Amino acid sequence: MNIKILGAHALESRRTNFVSVLVDNILALDAGGLTQKLSLQEQERIKAVLLTHSHADHIEGLAGLAMHAFLSNITVEVYAITDTITALTTHVFNSVIHPDFTRMPSPDKPSLRFHTIKPNKAQSIDDYSVFALPVRHSVPSVGYQITDQEGKSILYSGDTGPGLPSCWESISPSLLIMDCAVSDRWISEAPRLGHMTPGLLKPELVKFRQGKGYLPPVVLIHMVPMLGEEKEIAKEAAQIAQELNTTIELGYEGMEINI
């Protein structure tokens, strides 16, 4: 399984993009920085987009992908929970913010087709088993375990605050791609916003190891690239990695991982 980090940050700039992860060049996890990092030909290879929630920094690239699909007469298959689909069809693809690509060029062959994901239930999407797990954020959200036909799997948390142990019971990933938006200077505020800090993440990883008997490598994403936050997150994450005797890395645009 090949994983590419297309966007790893909570703000956009010349060097940073909103969050998006690409699996085997065909399965996109969130669409924040999806189109900015892919050629038009690479975009056409995408078979499905899985959205964790409806916030703009996770869906921004979907409109561009839909316009490309419209001009190419193809359909983008998008999977999300009911709340996310309702938010997008009501407030985004409503002919006011963006064209209603769910009915263009025709209702029978739209440029954008939504499919409902049910949490805590495995679902086959192309050649993958997809398991959506509810997580704690400011709007209804899920993370995803993606498992390929060889049994290799990753967990992509999307945006989440602490309180994940119930999720750990249902999954056995080879890699954790986790939200860690800010450093521990924000440790009291982050749970209210539905995000992690290294200090909040540590007990979650401890409970993972206690329950599963192992701890896979961890990649952190959704960092705020200002106020020295990335440097502080890196320092705090390195300390936790040493204490837990595991690997914790900060994700970055263009990062590629093979498992």
Image: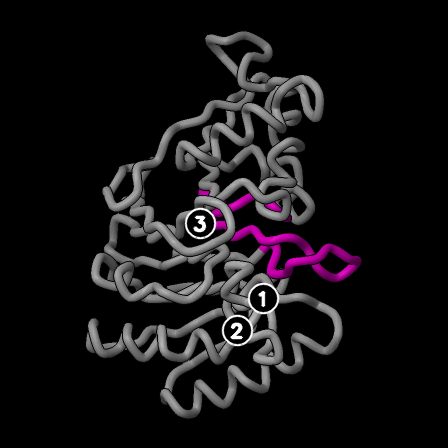
User: Residue 167: where, in percent of width, then height?
Assistant: 29, 59
Q: Nearer the viewer, residue 39 or 167?
A: 167
Is residue 31 on the magenta stretch?
yes
User: Residue 70: where, in percent of width, then height?
Assistant: 62, 19
User: Residue 17: where, in percent of width, then height?
Assistant: 68, 55
Q: Which mark is residue 197?
A: 2
To which residue does mark 1 refer? 181
Which mark is nearer the camera, 3 or 1?
Answer: 1
Q: Quadrant of residue 177?
A: bottom left
Q: Which mark is residue 86?
A: none
Q: What range is drawn magenta here?
A: 6-33
Task: Look at the picture and state if 154 lies above or below 113.
Answer: below
**Secondary structure of the magenta portion, mostly?**
loop
The furthest residue to the right: 14
Q: Residue at x 33, y 46 (%)?
A: 132
Q: Residues within 10 Å of mark 2 (few under 14, many from 20)?
A: many
Q: Residue at x 70, y 57 (%)?
A: 11
Secondary element under disc 3, as helix, strand or loop, is loop
Secondary element under disc 2, as helix, strand or loop, is loop
To which residue does mark 3 refer? 24
Please, what is the three-letter code of the amino acid marked with disc 2? Thr
Q: Tell whether label 1 touches label 3 (CB within 8 Å).
A: no
